[in-house]
Image (cartoon, grey):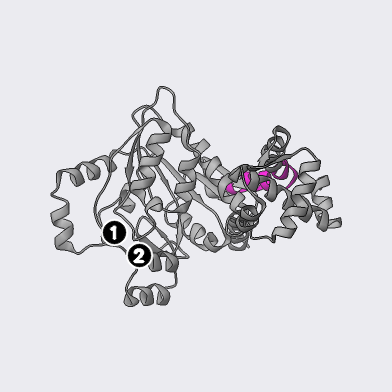
Amino acid sequence: MKSLYQFQQILIPELMHKMDERYRILKGIATLEPVGRRSLAEYLKETERHIRSETEFLDRQGLIEVTNKGMFITAAGHEIVESYYRMVKESTDLTTLEHQLKSRLGLKQIKIVPGDADTSPETKQILGKEAAIIFHEQIKDQSIVDVTGGSTMAMVANYMKPLERKRPLFIPARGGLGDLHEYQANSICVKMAQETNGDYRLLHVPDEMGPELKEKMLEQPGVKEIVSLMEKADVLIHGVGDALTMADRRKATEATKEKLKSSKAVGEAFGYYFDKNGNVIDRVDTIGISAELVKKIPSLITVAGGSSKKEAVAAFLRWIPSGWLIIDEAVARYLIEQLQENKS
């Protein structure tokens, strides 16, 4: 039986669009406060005129407060922001989808957040928040945590909180990536340790290197320590990337890119590139966690969202089954479609 929310989606789609739109604006204010209309319009990629009209409505409803310093969200506005996501999830089939995927994929736990992280900053934020909650549940005192880089992991770090009577040790799962500093595994380890009152170790090695340099680096005491800790890790939290996007970020050679294209690589994780069936196509030669070690880690937490990553996530799960999976609706619906096609 369809819920009222689902009937509204079918019969009055414009109402649902307006509701989603106002939620986005309210969430934007909550994220940026105090914020002016122009800055909010740029953040949400809307016209300033449209933002002015909508914020006037939200002000009249008592959901925001407009001051000389900018707009702030009120207590009533916060309540809407916190309950909207839960209402959407309960009123759609996402809970059913969670049960189906958990059973079909053999997962220990799965969380699906509404929306598509590629088009909604709010979806990516909720993805990070849910992943942080699951992460906190898996941590023990003296846990050793492997962490990969990327914008998704950076978002997860933003939602980590102090842990009571637990002091985890965070270590990067691999060498540096030619990427923004805040998206590198080293930086994310530091952030996670600071937020949870934990400790961290850093791995100062290039993302890609030749055999001779790799051998020399492995002789360094600091690098030896990290490699030893990787073998003892009990938690790994990581993202999944699109193969060609990651190759571009790594400034891979044209020969490597051509190999990935001709082999139809769709995903990347831990420096491994793989095709839709989970077969490894290529691997970046660096110091980092191996697939063999990944498969032995007790708590493997996979976090990914956005329709651009749906094939990569499906392929990763064929390669290395995850225990804990946090994804958005766009990825979840693709996964269930693939499972149904394979069944028929």
Decide whether the magenta segment is chiefly helix, strand or loop. helix
| Residue 92 in magenta stretch | yes
Residue 186: image x %, image y %? 33, 47
- Is residue 126 among the parts visible in the rendering? yes
* CB atoms of marks 1 and 2 within 8 Å: yes
Q: Is mark 1 on a helix, strand or loop?
A: loop
Q: Which amino acid does label 2 sit on?
A: Arg
Reading the image, the residue beneath label 2 is 250
**x 80%, y 40%: residue:** 61
- Is residue 1 among the parts visible in the rendering? no
Reading the image, the residue beneath label 1 is 207
Q: Taking 8 as reference, is 130 left or right?
A: left
The mark total stands at 2
Q: Quadrant of residue 140 in the image?
A: top left
Q: Which amino acid does label 1 sit on?
A: Asp
**x 39%, y 35%: residue:** 194
**x 42%, y 32%: residue:** 196
Compared to residue 214, the image places residue 137 above or below, namely above
Q: Give the range drawn in magenta.
A: 87-103
Dot 1 or dot 2, earlier in sequence? 1
